[in-house]
């Protein structure tokens, strides 16, 4: 597409579309090259959701990406293309400006397993990615946690540091050097990117070696020094991480931007916490998130000139503030705001201005929900439906109807003491409790352990609560889902366990005992309409505690008054009558608001003003659930968001935070158990530093890999409960690269590449490769499998030959299948027995061609070989 010509056709069945700006034209990038970006170019990326989950939004995202070496002319053309695309796509599109190395989490989430930054520009006659290109020498700097990037750097030891991963790519040989300060999760993700490059760019026909410990990988280090030269001294120290922590992101300011007498005026409107009513439909506003990100909000009635100047105004604001030029910019339209933008405000209503959205009510507004009241739960829950439709369980926050087995303990003297079942629903504000709930799902027993904390509980009991919870979790072999619940903010499933009979008394069992405490007058506030949302809390016995929308129970020495406010309904009255026996056995006298006897007011200490207007129903909002990877930097929480998330984004080394607004889930990978205590602390820090001023009483749910409840899995588009069964570890993946053949094969490769030596001092010099004879020779001149040799996890590799070493089309299957190494024909590599089959035998046994088999992930190859007798 030329700047002056029509827009490119957008294929409706594809989610992701990428164009490169080349010679001021918009040229489509082939799908197999997605994730490759040349530094001298600009790119345009369009993401169009195909079938969003009801909990996710339907807005499109339009990005323009600027390489660090891109010229001003290319940047101007990219901006013009984006403006025209935006006008064609409509106001339901969110626009982003991305700079190389500082991309938004939304942009990075498109590219798994990572992004590759390539030096220079793309010549018109070259392809983005050449498969089977082996005449190559480059060094890639791999870094990042959840979002990984690889950047071409100088082929020198000077480029290395101890905190990152470096990939020495020699065409047929790829050596991944892991810095001594890198974590196992970084090594694993680096290896995933390395294997992806091997498959995409070499068709799977390349050796991979991994250096974890230089002392144990002398063979690979010899190759590296032959290429890079003898290293003088040690590698540089790890580079400091420049990630923005949550405290910095919490500093939000909203500005009104407008023109006055040809001057641009930027007027500050408010700081944290922001409210939605600050955004007026005729205005344009800039929201500054601590200099980390700049949002431009465009009201639906703002002028076309304002909308066209969005990026220009953002750039001017960035300059005026002295922020880096690479600061990320996001432009959002009234009615199509991103989840990240919406959650910067204390409350957000999707009902505002719906009739003016394109096509009526926007799909983002139509779907999902945030905050406010819980979804309406039917009186009779269909258990089968909850188990077969986890998305329903997630939105209702109910794993079942609460009819499972229950055990309750009260923390006393820092130990857990069992509570008599007849007192299960009677809790004290000065205590902490453990509530263990057991239920069946698909024939398996599942567990939820609620850690309930009273408002008046002392610090030592809160600490003991967590310690006792850990003891129980150990007893149940780590199978407990642990939910931290604060008094007054109990989730619906917790309330359903007690079937509307939950009563929270003031005081503590330390002083009052488990029996009903005596008092001259006690007042209880009953809230709720059914067994899933009813709780009764003891409040101060004075008239100002009353509320016309609710029901109160006043217990005196002689009488029990059940007071019905004018605003209560029949369901509330029914639940209140049911809870009275749990509080008092005295005769109950029903009192209507406005008809109270004199003794009623005397018991409350006299009349006093109280809220009498009808309580407005709380409304939800259309914010999506959001998934983040958690880490810590200098003692502060650092979050990396994964947008358009799926189960694939949960890694065994991760601690992930899923924010559904009503609950915070903390998912703990099986290899991340050491972060268990930190995870809950991170959840609390997330709430405390959230720009929207979140309630610290929001329930925190700790979920361990393999024990996910439907209230968690239902937020994912699909969920495979068997996904992690027999999943190989990072070490197993490394070993599956063919450890036994490593040394000989790589040595043979080095000899083939004619390593040269500097004369005299024996120092290794630069590697010189033989010029390829032709493209056909380059892709077919693979190494034959070498003889069996020793290896280690620190130096592992694999090689897939493209030509069979056996004459006559292969060896008979009976000589290879289920044979020990010593019984194989001479010259057969025991780690690659399947390679020596004829093409027809291979197809017959494996059900696929050799090319298809070797394009699979290595661990999948190993599983196939084990199953079919070729391991």
Image (spheres, helix red, strand yellow):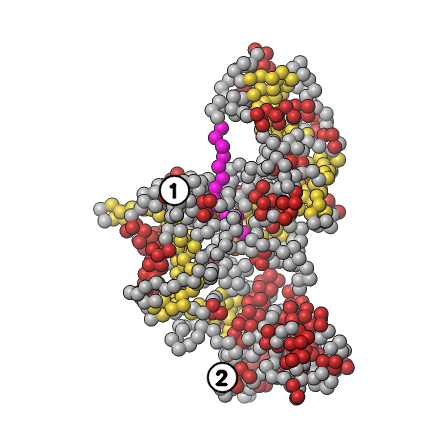
Where residue 651 sits: x, y (%)? 60, 58
Residue reaching furthest top?
Answer: 598
Q: Which region of the structure is painted magenta?
A: 615-632
How many neighbours does mark 1 have within 10 angstroms: few (below 14), some (14-19), or many (20 or more)?
Answer: few
The majority secondary structure of the magenta stretch comes to loop
Q: Tell me what residue is drawn at x 45 percent, y 45 percent.
A: 365
Depth check: give the residue in front, 570 or 612: 570
Whole-percent x, y for residue 720 in the image: 63, 56
Q: Position of residue 268 (x, y in %)?
A: 35, 43
Counting from the top left corner in percent of width and height, residue 399 is at: 64, 43
Reading the image, the residue beneath label 1 is 355
- Camera sees residue 571: yes
Quadrant, the N terminus: bottom left
Task: Please report the residue visible at 66 percent of the width from the left and 57 percent of the height from the top.
Answer: 722
Please say whether residue 630 is one of the residues in the magenta stretch: yes
Marks 2 and 1 sit apart, C-alpha to C-alpha, by 60 Å
Kindly state the secondary structure of the residue where label 1 is placed.
Answer: helix
Quadrant of the image containing the C terminus: bottom right
Q: Residue at x 58, y 67 (%)?
A: 191
Q: Is residue 856 above or below residue 361?
A: below
Q: Is the Cβ of the residue at disc 2 closer than 8 Å to that at disc 1?
A: no
Point out the tag, 2 or 1, that comes first from the N-terminus: 1
Residue placed under numbered mark 2 in the picture = 775
Q: Secondary structure at mark 2?
A: helix
Asked if residue 629 shows in the view, the reply is no
Q: Residues within 10 Å of mark 2 (few under 14, many from 20)?
A: few
């Amino acid at each position: 597409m030329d700047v002056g010509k029509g827009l490119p056709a957008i294929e409706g069945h594809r989610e992701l579309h990428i164009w490169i700006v080349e010679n001021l034209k918009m040229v489509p990038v082939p799908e197999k090259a997605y994730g490759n970006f040349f530094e001298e170019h600009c790119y345009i990326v369009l993401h169009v959701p195909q079938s969003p989950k009801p909990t996710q939004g339907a807005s499109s995202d339009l990005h323009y990406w600027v390489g660090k070496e891109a010229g001003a002319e290319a940047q101007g053309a990219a901006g013009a293309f984006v403006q025209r695309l935006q006008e064609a796509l409509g106001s339901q599109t969110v626009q982003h400006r991305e700079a190389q190395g500082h991309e938004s989490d939304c942009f990075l989430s498109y590219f798994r397993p990572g992004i590759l930054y390539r030096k220079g520009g793309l010549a018109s006659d070259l392809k983005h990615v050449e498969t089977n290109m082996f005449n190559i020498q480059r060094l890639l700097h791999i870094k990042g946690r959840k979002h990984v990037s690889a950047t071409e750097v100088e082929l020198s030891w000077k480029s290395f540091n101890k905190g990152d991963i470096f990939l020495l790519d020699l065409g047929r040989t790829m050596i991944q050097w892991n810095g001594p300060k890198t974590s196992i999760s970084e090594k694993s993700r680096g290896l995933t990117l390395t294997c992806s490059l091997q498959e995409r760019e070499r068709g799977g026909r390349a050796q991979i070696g991994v250096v974890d410990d230089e002392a144990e990988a002398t063979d690979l280090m010899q190759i590296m020094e032959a290429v890079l030269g003898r290293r003088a001294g040690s590698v540089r120290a790890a580079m400091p991480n420049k990630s923005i922590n949550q405290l910095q992101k919490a500093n939000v300011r909203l500005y009104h931007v407008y023109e006055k007498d040809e001057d641009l005026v930027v007027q500050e409107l408010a700081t944290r916490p922001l409210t939605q009513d600050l955004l007026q439909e005729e205005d344009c506003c800039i929201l500054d998130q601590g200099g980390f990100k700049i949002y431009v909000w465009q009201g639906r009635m703002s002028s076309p000139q304002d909308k066209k100047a969005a990026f220009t105004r953002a750039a001017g604001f960035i300059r005026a503030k002295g922020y880096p030029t690479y600061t990320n910019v996001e432009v959002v339209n009234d009615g199509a705001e991103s989840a990240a933008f919406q959650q910067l405000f204390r409350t957000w209503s999707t009902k505002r201005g719906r009739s003016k959205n394109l096509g009526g009510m926007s799909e983002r507004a139509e779907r999902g929900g945030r905050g406010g009241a819980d979804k309406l739960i039917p009186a009779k829950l269909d258990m089968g439906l909850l188990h077969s439709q986890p998305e329903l369980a997630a939105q209702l926050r109910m794993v079942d109807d609460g009819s499972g087995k229950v055990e309750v303990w009260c923390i006393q003297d820092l130990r857990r003491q069992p509570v008599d079942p007849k007192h299960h629903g009677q809790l004290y504000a000065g205590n902490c409790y453990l509530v263990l709930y057991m239920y069946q799902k698909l024939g398996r027993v599942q567990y939820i352990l609620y850690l309930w904390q009273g408002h008046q509980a002392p610090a030592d009991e809160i600490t003991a609560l967590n310690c006792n919870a850990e003891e129980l979790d150990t007893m149940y072999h780590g199978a407990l889902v642990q939910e931290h619940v604060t008094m007054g903010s109990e989730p619906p499933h917790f309330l359903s366990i007690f079937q509307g009979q939950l009563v929270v008394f003031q005081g503590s069992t330390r002083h009052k005992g488990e029996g009903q405490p005596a008092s001259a007058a006690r007042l209880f506030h009953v809230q709720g309409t059914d067994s899933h949302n009813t709780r009764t809390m003891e409040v101060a016995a004075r008239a100002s505690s009353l509320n016309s929308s609710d029901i109160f129970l006043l217990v005196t020495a002689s009488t029990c008054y059940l007071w019905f406010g004018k605003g209560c309904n029949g369901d509330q009255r029914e639940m209140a009558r049911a809870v009275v026996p749990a509080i008092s056995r005295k005769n109950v006298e029903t009192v209507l608001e406005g008809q109270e006897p004199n003794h009623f007011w005397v018991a409350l200490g006299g009349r006093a003003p109280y809220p009498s207007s009808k309580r407005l129903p709380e409304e939800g909002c259309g914010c999506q659930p959001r998934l983040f990877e958690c880490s810590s930097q200098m003692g502060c929480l650092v979050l990396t968001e994964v947008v358009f998330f799926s189960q694939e984004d949960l890694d065994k080394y991760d601690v992930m935070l899923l924010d559904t607004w009503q609950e915070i889930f903390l998912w703990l990978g099986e290899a991340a158990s050491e972060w268990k205590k930190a995870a809950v602390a991170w959840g609390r820090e997330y709430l405390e530093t959230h720009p929207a001023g979140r309630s610290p009483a929001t329930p925190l749910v700790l979920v361990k890999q393999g024990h996910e409840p439907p209230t968690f899995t239902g937020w994912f588009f699909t969920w495979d409960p068997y996904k992690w069964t027999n999943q190989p570890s990072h070490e197993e993946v490394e070993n599956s690269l063919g450890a036994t053949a490593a040394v000989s094969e790589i040595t043979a490769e080095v000899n083939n590449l004619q390593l040269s030596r500097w004369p005299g001092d024996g120092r290794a010099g630069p590697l010189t490769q033989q010029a390829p004879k032709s493209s056909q020779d380059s892709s077919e001149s693979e190494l034959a499998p070498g003889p069996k040799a020793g290896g280690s996890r620190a130096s592992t590799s694999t090689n897939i030959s493209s030509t069979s070493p056996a004459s006559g089309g292969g060896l008979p299957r009976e000589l290879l299948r289920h044979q020990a190494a010593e019984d194989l024909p001479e010259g057969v590599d025991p780690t690659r027995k399947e390679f020596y089959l004829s093409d027809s035998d291979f197809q017959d046994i494996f059900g696929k061609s050799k090319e298809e088999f070797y394009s699979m992930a290595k661990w999948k190859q190993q599983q196939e070989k084990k199953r079919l007798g070729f391991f």
